[in-house]
Image (cartoon, rainbow, N blue to C red):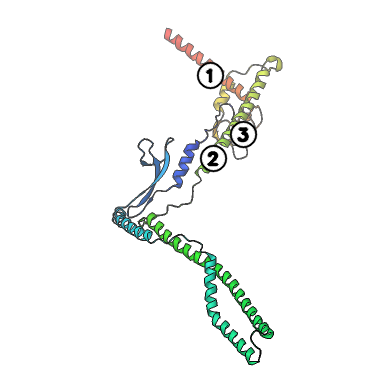
Amino acid sequence: MGKGNSAPPAPDARQTAAAEAQFNRLDTYSPDGFGVRYGFTNPTTGEFQQGIAPANAQSAVTTVESPEQRAIREAIEPASVTFVERMVDENVADMPGPARVEDRSNIAGSIFNRNFSLMAPAIDMNQRRLINNLQARGIPVGSEAFNEAYGDQQRTTMDTLARMAMDADIASGQEQSRQFSLDASERGTALAEIAALMGGNYTPPTSAPSGAVQPVNYSGLVGSQYNADVNRGNASAAATGGIASGLGTLGAAAIMKCTMHAKEVSGPLPVGWAANTVQMMPLHVWKYRPGHAPIPGDNAEHIGPMAEHFHGMTGLGNPHTINAIDYLGLLAGALQAALNRIDMLEARVEIGSVH
């Protein structure tokens, strides 16, 4: 900023933030009396208070019940508590135990025994058929041919039993996982039901509006306004500095060149000429047309003569501009004549008063 111009004060950060919060937090009001209120916690009383939070207070929000909602809540909450207590008592007593991994060998043995019990009659029948077949062919029990045939059948039976034991082991793992999942699911369901009962509470229905609106960028608007004020101040300071610089230059030139040694003096100004010229010269109220002002942005009204009239009545300058030195000289001559006339009139008044 130039001399004589001060920068606009920067916006207060806290006030800007508080105003933006106030714009973007809407209190809601429903037809039945329910509402959401925004404000702050009173640092002295600890109570909620509507409005913008002062410097030493914390922002807060609260809800307001309608009379109908309060009546419903007060009627339902005791019944809800009683129901929860009863359900907890009943479910805790019969709560399923934690899931445990059962012994796999017991499951495998159970599966094998069940399958073997199904196959045992067929194995016995095949053995009897083999013995009867060998005896019918005249092969005595204990002979080499009998032992060879009987051994082949035994090995086939043992292979079948081995595969059955392997299948039972695989099936036992699957059954083990299935049983564990069932136990865990049952336990988890029971716990979830109890947790829901213990943590649940009655939530009264509300019809309040959401309060959601398009956010207002208040801080951005304040910043834009501040930047505009700064730019406008800078422009004004630059313009003022330009005027002062021009006047200073003109004044310096006039002071430096005001001695008689720097001029050719033609003679004294005719008495009364300057006063008559100023008295007869038309004066106007005017302002510059767009694009013609010597200082950009000069749209103000001014008063004074036109260059055409000044030049035509004084012969000084040209029809387009008025020389500041000539204008000041003309005014000085008119003022001198006016002062002389005042002195003369005062002298006449004094002489008349003596007689």
Q: In this view, does 136 lie above or below 42?
A: below
Is label 2 in a helix, a strand or a loop? helix
Q: Which of labels 2 and 3 is toward the front?
A: 2
Image quarter of residue 325: top right
> Circle 3 sits on which residue?
295
Is label 3 in a helix, a strand or a loop? loop
Instruction: Residue 223: give its label.
Output: 2
User: How far from the left and from the top, in percent, is residue 67?
Assistant: 29, 53
The answer to whether any part of residue 314 appears in the image is no
Q: Is the residue under label 3 in contact with that under label 2 (CB below 8 Å)?
A: no
Separation of marks 3 and 1 at Cα, in angstroms:
34 Å
Q: Where the N terminus falls, by quadrant?
A: top right
| Sequence-wise first label, 2 or 3 | 2
User: With 230 as the anchor, is 264 left or right in this view?
Assistant: right
Image quarter of residue 349: top left
User: How far from the left and from the top, in percent, is residue 337?
Assistant: 55, 18
Disc 2 residue type (three-letter): Gly
User: How far from the left and from the top, in percent, is residue 308?
Assistant: 62, 32
In this view, which residue lies farthest toward the top? Answer: 354
| Sequence-wise first label, 1 or 2 | 2
